Image (cartoon, rainbow, N blue to C red):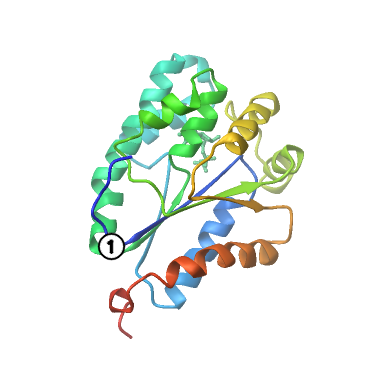
Amino acid sequence: MTIHKRSGLLIVFEGTDGTGKSTQHQLLGEYLQKHHYPVISTREPTDGSFGAKIRQLYTNRTMSSPEEELKLFLDDRKQHVEKLIAPALKKGEIVLCDRYFLSTAAYQGAAGFDPETILRRNSFAPDPDLALLFQAPLQTGSERIVHGRGETLNDFEQLDTLKKVAEIFSSLNRPYIQAIDATGSIKTVHKIVLQHVLPLLETFPSSQRIKQ
Ligand code: TYD
């Protein structure tokens, strides 16, 4: 994909809903801050104008066609890359992003598009240095959403859809993807996350760390 000159790191959190990726995102952010790394936490869909439109789809996906829906996710990401991700990477920061283009490949792939075509349509977006793919039985994820958060499943979270989403996630083959067994405790999964992140940090120039 597009080569962007950068000195920061891009770490993304991917997987089906309810696998605990947002909790792990937060924990890694806290860890990096504590160790004086310049870190920015962000997420997709974003809080921008396209993200707001996407959230309206949560309750009724039939409001737009599959192509319109895909375009909204791509427009949201373009804005996100231009305004936040690319400038932060250029400045040498570590960007932690909850969902990125592998989610589009998996979710809009499950809606009928070819996942590789979707990835090509994301060529404007810098490749992550590491994509942590959180995997847990779908039943566990749905139970965490319904019982843990007291929410109902939105239109992206219905079980038959999620089954397809999980299959596509597992089929994606990119050197930066690391599958994470997300069935353990929060602490256990955090340790696994660190096992993947620490080697990357060794490549991070100490001059870019925040002076105490
Ligand atoms: P989610 O991470 O659950 O966000 P929030 O915490 O704001 O609810 O993402 C919302 C849904 O959007 C999720 O079910 C997956 C879906 N999604 C896509 O379908 N395509 C994409 O490209 C992205 C980023 C998310």
* Left or right: where 11 falls relative to 22: left
The image shows residue 63, relative to residue 122, as above or below, that is: above
Identity of the residue drawn at 54% across and 31% down:
106
Q: Quickly name the residue at label 1.
A: 7
Q: How many marks?
A: 1
Q: Residue 105 or 18: which is nearer the viewer?
A: 105
- On the image, which quarter does residue 5 sit in? bottom left
Percent position of residue 46, x then y = 38, 42
Identity of the residue drawn at 41% across and 50% down:
128
Percent position of residue 154, x then y = 60, 30
Percent position of residue 186, x then y = 67, 62
Percent position of residue 101, x then y = 43, 38
Q: Residue 22 or 11: which is nearer the viewer?
A: 11
Disc 1, SS: loop
* Left or right: where 73 falls relative to 59: left
Q: Amino acid at mark 1?
A: Ser
The image shows residue 50, relative to residue 39, as above or below, that is: above
